Image (cartoon, rainbow, N blue to C red):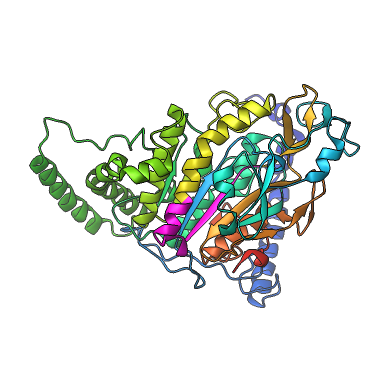
Amino acid sequence: MHDQSEHVSPLGRDLLSRRNFLSQAGTSMGALGLAKLLSADKLLGSGDDPTAFSGKQPIRPDIDPNNPYASRPPHNSVPAKNVLVIFCPGAVSHVDTFDYKPALAKLHGKPAPFAPAVTFEGPPGNCAKPFWDFKARGQSGKMTSELLPKLGALADDFCFIHSLHTQTSAHPQGENFLHTGFTMEGFPSFGAWATYALGSENSELPAFIAINDPRGFARSGKNNFGNGFLPAAFQGTDFNSKNPPANLSRPDSYSSADDRATNDLLARLNGKHMERYPEDANLAARIASYELAGRMQTSVPELMDVSNEPISIQKEYGTDTGTDLKREYAKNCILARRLIERGVRVVQLFNGSDPSGGNGITNWDSHSNILKTHAMQAEIMDQPTAALIHDLKRRGLLEDTLVVWCTEFGRMPFLQSNGSGRDHNPDAFTCFLAGAGVKAGHSHGESDEFGFKSVKDRVSVYDFNATILHLMGLDHERLSFYHNGLERRLTNVHGHVVHDVIA
């Protein structure tokens, strides 16, 4: 027999040594025993659970595998029962929309003394004042730009956060970070965490629905509403007014009586199978998912028919004017309101897509000709979004619905070297909240006088997500899921609730 030891690395030969194996095994067993003793005496760290990084005991939702979407109580009593997230991919320019910076006019057309040598896409150009005039709105006198006049008119209902900052200036990572708390792929989205914790009050529709832009997915695609390592039941179901959920329509050759008979037979077979395997949670979740799909066959057609809305509503949202994209987005906004009315826990509405890079054409990523490209996106977004928020308020739905308007980062107060676009700015951007539990007509935090960096009461994305969870009645430090040896959570090991924005 040939000696194969020459083909084994020194490390491999060391591992094959019986003496080394016994030595390492003995040391490891001793360490495990010590950890057990320290844990019993609560000496591994603060708190009762040594796996909790906050020192707080994790709160695990009590999920029935046969009904994973059942409504569950929050950690704390708060008014927000539902959340509507309006996400604008591509990075909306805060200095051209909601963050008024008159000092930029003094440096307009001049080199920015605070600009770095290189930004995301290269060397900077000169400073540029806002491309649209700002105007005082409402009783609060909030200064917002004429780019979004209808949203600006609702400023007294909004709580603006002007001091946001993020960890990345790249769109895919920025979208991931905003929605999942991590720049990498594979982590659960905010909507998945919320529905994992709270379930839904509607048994006929999914607990979490993502309404994608008429033009397609945003840059990070389904990761923005994915379940990551959480059970698959909590991923977002994506459809919009133009593209209803797939595979729900009954074939023409198949009668409703045939359908009912088939469903009854399946229910009996599934029941017998569950009796044989009562501990199979994955099987129960799959059955629950198929049963929900069956119920959606009757609930979705009526939901999707936004044409039966009154003419006054159609005109308010703008389904009859503007470009095809604006009319389709307006229908998506009506669909979002109908979902909130029906008690869907999380509705995520996208304004913009990124099938091939965007660059201001399919989203807000205006690296060139921002005057044209931002105006094009605003024409699509402003009227329908304002109508949606106003309609929710008029119907009393804002009393228990939290509205989150957000984008992944901001844009620079100076132009790019091309002289017509603004580059990515991760150090300062603006989002706003409205509705249940939020201070109305309020502004929190500040960026510097040029909108370059957040400087006062700075809010990280971790803080932003912690605050949204808090407004949903959830403790971001205790809502966790044990995965690969770690207690994972939306805010990782960071984040503080921004109490100043809470009513």
Does 207 appear in magenta? no
- Tell me where residue 92 sits by quadrant: top right
Q: Residue at x 69, y 40 (%)?
A: 133
Q: How many marks?
A: 0
Residue 185 at x, y percent in the picture: 58, 40
Name the residue at the right extreme: 113
Quadrant containing the N terminus in the rendered view = top right
Which quadrant of the figure has residue 58? bottom right
Nearer to me, 173 or 119 = 119
Q: Is residue 145 left or right of residue 274?
A: right
User: Is residue 260 visible in this depiction of the protein?
Assistant: yes
Frontmost residue, 397 versus 287? 397
Q: Residue at x 73, y 57 (%)?
A: 445
From the top left corner, tell me how far across and down residue 494 is, in percent: 69, 58
For the C terminus, the image quarter is: bottom right
Where 363 falls versus 233 (above or below)?
Answer: above
Q: Which residues are magenta?
A: 389-408
Can see residue 491?
A: no
Viewer-proximal residue among 314 and 450: 314
Q: Position of residue 459 (x, y in %)?
A: 71, 56
**Between 87 and 21, the one nearer to me in the picture:** 87
Q: Residue furthest bottom?
A: 41
Residue at point 31%, 54% (across, down)? 284
Q: Position of residue 84 (x, y in %)?
A: 48, 52
Q: Is residue 194 left or right of residue 490?
A: left
